[in-house]
Image (cartoon, grey):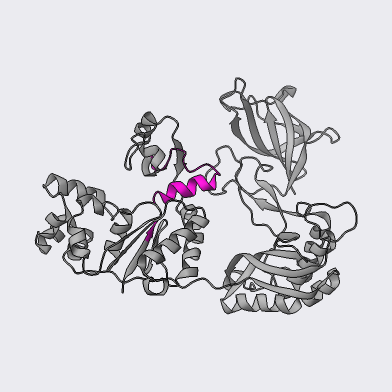
Amino acid sequence: MRVMVVWCPDWPVVAALADEGLPTHLPAAVFSANIVQACNAGARAFGVRRGMRRRDAQSRCPELKVCAAVPDRDTRAFEPVLAAVEELRPGVAPLRPGLLALRAPGRFYGGEPAAAALLAERLVGLGVWDCRIGVADELFTAEQAARRAEPQDCHVIEPGESVPFLRGLPVEAIEDLPDGRDAVSLMRRLGLRTLADLADLRASDVRDRFGAQVAWVHRVVGGDGGVLLATRTPPPELACHVDFEPPLDSAETISFSVRQTADRFVAGLARQQLVCTEVRIAARCEGQTEPASSRVWLHPRWFSAADLVDRLHWQLQGAMRNGPSRAGEVRAPVDRVVLEPVTVVPDAVHADALWGNTDERVERGIARVQGMLGHEAVVRPVLQGGRSPAARQALVPWGERPAGLRPVGPPWPGSIPPPAPSRVLSTPWSAEVIGAAGRPVAVDERGAVTCAPERFRSDPGSGWQPVAAWAGPWPVEELWWEERPRRVARFQVVGVDGRAWLLTCDEGVWWTEAVYD
């Protein structure tokens, strides 16, 4: 079995630039803990190298684009490459983002160079301009061959020539192994320059001095220790579509005709033990290649077949309205409807709780109102991090997963202790707090109270009442970097009537912020 390796150099940098929509020729580097993990050719032209500190890299290239290391981003960006290769040859083994291996499909395409050329053409069509391919008897040798190929070219190691090829490589060829840089540094200090020098040592000495990874390379260079490909199973096709002949021009007729397709869509997910929480519904008009109406729908739990039919009906009702032509509207009969899952999760995540969940009729009613008023018109409150009760509230559209919220976990200095108030006022009320002899209560710059509160008034329309108990202050200094920072202190005050209030002293002015009912 021959092995083909496809290598896309500097993939973390390629993925980072593509994620931000920047050109690939821009000098850029990916950093982790202020150390260069990967850099592209534009950065290397200025002398930037892997393992270099950030300040040294920026001193050599001041216009260097600094990108954070995000492994999930690299993996997501590499998924289309894996899918494109699987179309030509199933059984792809992803080694890491930017590097994959497969069984060389030479005989089917008329030879290994011809198969490599076809594969490079497919990747260039995806926008991956720098792809290099190596073919050899064994995985490690094929990877080294790919690293010595030209862009969009293939380096083929003939059968039985792996060992001579590897013996001529410098020891820097193993830098990408775990702890490979330290091993290479030690080899050079010991006078080892090529893998042939390493192969001439005894196996026990190599294992004891350099560790298990270098010992494995020692066996491979000696003609042993080849690695079998751990290929992945291509992901199942979960999207479903239905074609109409002749095309249909009624939202009710289209929705009725899609019922069986919606059942098939949900059943296909169930066979994989999955449910869909985010789906894209697209309707294509007759004579067009792109969908005339496409929308992503979210569900607070998961989509059933009836939910999919409802969403399609609501989408088409809005897209088929009369009036001036606008983007996203259906102006011709529909000949295809596509149901494509955007987000799927294991069905166990949304299993019914012990005492049940939200009534399905309520969920459908809310989704119906949302379809009539707009996605942002129906929201639900979500807890997030913050110091004030109002700052801890966030409103998220119904059915949408919260994103970009402040984390609740980290400590928030100046936040009030539990229990949380039951009612947070959207507009704070003007309040007054006085101490002995009618002196106004205030908080100085050090967070100390000028006098103990004795009476308070929660809003201008209420009367004065004595303070039964109080706690605080919890001072917060906001915008401390400005010329005049804002100092706020919060108090929990209980009146003689038993009601509790959250009062705020903002630069000597009192406000009622929340109520403990």
Q: Between 27 and 59, which is closer to the camera in this rendering? A: 27
Q: Position of residue 169 (x, y in %)?
A: 21, 54
Q: Position of residue 294 (x, y in %)?
A: 72, 60
In this rendering, the answer to whether 431 lies above or below 71 is above
Q: Is residue 435 visible?
A: no
Q: Position of residue 371 (x, y in %)?
A: 80, 59
Q: Is residue 362 left or right of residue 323?
A: left
The residue most toward the top is: 483
The residue most toward the right is: 323
- Identify which residue is drawn at 61% across, 36% down: 472
- Identify which residue is drawn at 48% across, 43% down: 24
- Identify which residue is drawn at 31% across, 74% down: 1
Q: Is residue 321 magenta?
A: no
In this rendering, the answer to whether 257 lies above or below 203 is below
Q: Is residue 132 left or right of residue 464?
A: left
Q: Is residue 20 magenta?
A: yes
Q: Is residue 274 left or right of residue 264?
A: left
- Identify which residue is drawn at 40% across, 65% down: 114
Q: Is residue 168 visible?
A: yes
Q: State which region is magenta.
A: 6-34
Q: How many marks?
A: 0
Q: Position of residue 168 (x, y in %)?
A: 18, 55
Quadrant assignment, res 251: bottom right
Q: Between 43 and 281, which is closer to the camera in this rendering? A: 43
Q: Between 442 and 375, which is closer to the camera in this rendering? A: 375
